[in-house]
Image (cartoon, rainbow, N blue to C red):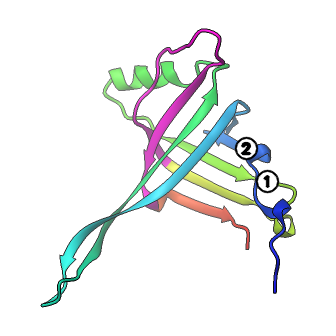
């Protein structure tokens, strides 16, 4: 029987994020997921409700420590001009204790941002800025996985 060693559980301490090729050292957290959009289907004469896959939606968010006003001026200017700029995000989790020294790495192309926080602060607290985003599921490139 294989026993899971606690040291093999991934820790985000060694994770990295690149936004349009630029390493973002102030990243606090990152999450991206694919949501299966479904419609309910009544199955024959039974009382069962099943579902049918209709489409996929990519969504996520990244939270950055407030060091720079990263991206807000560029995004707002483009939106005011009626443009919808797209970005590329690459995430890497490179925990040195991962099984077999393996890594997780994904690149998400065609990323759009849903909102930007222009200014926020709370007295006596370190600042953070959250960037919710969306993308097409077909624009994801899973480059490395831990097997």
Q: Residue furthest left?
A: 45
Residue 88 is a magenta residue: no
- Which of the 4 image quarters holds residue 46? bottom left
Q: Residues within 10 Å of mark 2 (few under 14, many from 20)?
A: many
Q: Image quadrant for the C terminus?
A: bottom right
- Which of the 4 image quarters holds residue 68? top right
Look at mark 2 in the image and give the residue it sits on.
Answer: 16
In the rendered structure, which disc, 1 or 2, sits on the residue that comes first in sequence?
Answer: 2
Q: Looking at the picture, how far across and down is residue 146, in whole percent?
A: 73, 68
Residue plotted at (63% across, 56% down): 106
Secondary structure of the residue carrying tag 1 is loop
Residue 55 as seen in the image, left or right of residue 85 = left
Q: Are marks 1 and 2 in contact (CB under 8 Å)?
A: yes
Specify start and end residues of the magenta stretch as a single range. 110-137
Secondary structure of the residue carrying tag 2 is strand
Q: Is residue 109 above or below residue 124?
A: below
Residue 114 is a magenta residue: yes
Residue plotted at (47% across, 38% down): 132
Residue plotted at (40% across, 35% down): 114
Q: Is residue 141 above or below residue 46?
A: above
Front residue of 46 and 16: 46
- Which of the 4 image quarters holds residue 51? bottom left
Look at mark 1 in the image and give the residue it sits on.
Answer: 94
Front residue of 53 and 76: 53
Give the distance between the C-alpha atoms of the residues marked 1 and 2, in whole angstroms.
Answer: 8 Å
Q: Residues within 10 Å of mark 1 (few under 14, many from 20)?
A: some
Residue 145 as seen in the image, left or right of residue 117 = right
Residue plotted at (71% across, 60% down): 104
Q: Looking at the picture, how far across and down is residue 66, in whole percent?
A: 63, 21
């Amino acid at each position: 029987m294989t026993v899971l060693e606690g040291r093999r559980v991934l820790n985000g301490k060694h994770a990295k994020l690149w936004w349009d090729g630029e390493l973002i050292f102030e990243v606090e957290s990152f999450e991206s997921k694919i949501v299966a959009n479904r419609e309910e289907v009544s199955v024959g004469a039974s009382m069962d409700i099943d579902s049918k896959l209709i489409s996929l939606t990519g969504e996520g968010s990244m939270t950055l420590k407030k060091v720079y006003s990263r991206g807000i001026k560029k995004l707002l200017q483009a939106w005011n001009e009626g443009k919808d700029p797209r970005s590329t995000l690459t995430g890497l989790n490179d925990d040195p204790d991962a099984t077999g020294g393996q890594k997780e790495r994904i690149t998400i192309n065609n990323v759009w941002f849903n909102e930007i926080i222009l200014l926020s602060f709370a007295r006596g607290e370190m600042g953070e800025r959250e960037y919710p985003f969306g993308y097409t599921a077909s624009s994801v490139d899973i480059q490395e996985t831990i097997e």
